[in-house]
Image (cartoon, grey):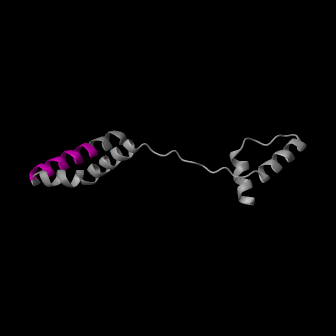
Amino acid sequence: MHDALLSCMIRSRKLPKDTNQRAAEIVRLSTEEPQEQTTPKPNPISEYLASIGRKGGLKGGKARAEKLSAKKRTEIAKNAAKSRWSSAKKTVK
């Protein structure tokens, strides 16, 4: 009960400065039933598209690595390292 009161008071607006109004607000907050948060049900189309995107993302890097030759992967890695280190030198200056 005490935790619910604190969470309501934290989330609610500031308490009034007037003593009587403040007492009334505290009583209202402590006796009020907590409202359950209802999350809207996601659109079935959005769920389907999210599952497709997740599936592609899970296999994307592995599939690309398998298709590339070792020479091409090495070239990509060298370019990435060169780019990474060249930007790091610029920021140190």
Total numbered circles? 0
Image check: 38 left or right of 68?
right
In the rendered view, does 92 fall on the left or right side of 33? Answer: left
Name the image quarter holding residue 58.
bottom left
To which quarter of the image does residue 14 belong?
A: top right
Q: Is residue 44 a member of the stretch shown in magenta? A: no
- Which portion, as a residue range, is magenta? 71-85
Q: Position of residue 51 (x, y in %)?
A: 33, 49
Residue found at x 11% / y 49%: 72
Q: Is residue 86 above or below residue 61?
A: above
Q: Give the quadrant of the N terminus.
A: bottom right
Q: Residue furthest front?
A: 44
Residue beneath the point at 54% across and 47% down: 39
Tell me if 11 is positioned left or right of 70 in this view.
right
Coordinates of residue 69 in the picture (x, y in percent):
9, 52
Q: Please state which of residues 85 and 17 is positioned toward the viewer in this rendering.
A: 17
Left or right placement of residue 86 versus residue 65 in this view: right
Q: Quadrant of the C terminus?
A: top left
In this rendering, is residue 3 above or below 16? below
Tell which of 44 and 17 is nearer to you.
Answer: 44
Residue 36 placement (x, y as % from top left): 63, 51
Where's residue 30, x and y in %? Answer: 78, 53
Main secondary structure type of the part rendered in magenta: helix
Which residue lies at the image location 68% right of the left edge and 46% below the top edge?
11
Residue depicted at x 67% and y 49%: 35
Occupied quadrant, residue 89:
top left
Residue furthest right as drawn: 20
